[in-house]
Amino acid sequence: MALTEEEQKKARLKAMRLLEHMDRTEKGLADRLKQEGFSGEAIQDAMDYVKSFGYINDVRYAQHYISYRLGIKSKQMILQELARKGISRETALTAWEEAEELEEHDEKALLRRTIEKKYAPGTILDDKEMRRLYAYLARRGFRSGDIFSVLDELEITSARDNWEE
């Protein structure tokens, strides 16, 4: 079935309206147009149309996304969220490098603040609490070595002397 002029016009208009409200990834916009019932041809045409004006740009989206969350979330967590939004790993890493040049990002400082929100330096935790804290931090994308390093630095220890993963 060929793309009709009417469907083409409606798809382009819908894409423009969707981008008025918020910046989107290519995948996000395409998915939204698909939900609206547009054909694959109409979606591709609308995507090409908005790209021609520079209204959609995954690198720019990733840079904004990263700069907004830098200092709040771990690098790994941000990269995972971008992947779920359809941003390629290569694009996300490029955007990360550019964002780091603009803003200083200290992963260990973020980890330290995250731990200090839960426990004061020098706290002694039982094994269950330590496992929970470790799992909480790991789920947020912090690396194992960094977690143990910052826990040692803050002197947060387990009641058991040789606690390991």
Image: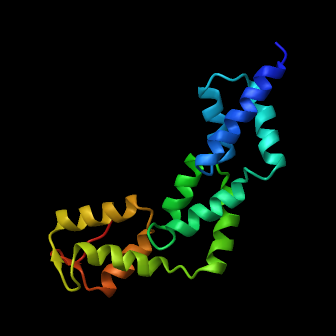
Residue shown at 23% from the left, 85% from the top: 121
Residue shown at 65% from the left, 57% from the top: 61
Split into 4 quadrants, where in the image is the C terminus?
Answer: bottom left
Q: Is residue 130 above or below residue 49?
A: below
- Farthest residue toward the top? 1
Residue 52 in percent (x, y) is at: 84, 47
Please name whichever residue, 124 or 118, is drawn nearer the observer in this view of the structure.
118
Asked if residue 26 lies left or right of residue 71, the reply is: right
Q: Is residue 152 above or below residue 4?
A: below
Residue 48 in percent (x, y) is at: 82, 40
Q: Decide if residue 90 is in sight here.
A: no
Residue shown at 57% from the left, 65% from the top: 66
Asked if residue 112 lies left or right of residue 13, the reply is: left
Report the label total: 0
Asked if residue 142 lies left or right of residue 101, the reply is: left
Q: Is residue 1 above or below residue 20?
A: above
Give the colour scheme shown: rainbow
Residue 144 in percent (x, y) is at: 42, 69
Please name whichever residue, 163 or 79, is drawn nearer the observer in this view of the structure.
79
Asked if residue 128 lies left or right of residue 37, the reply is: left
Q: Residue 50, located in which quarter of the rendered image?
A: top right
Q: Decide if residue 11 is in sight here.
A: yes
Split into 4 quadrants, where in the image is the N terminus?
Answer: top right
Please name whichever residue, 145 or 101, is drawn nearer the observer in this view of the structure.
101
Residue 145 in percent (x, y) is at: 43, 74
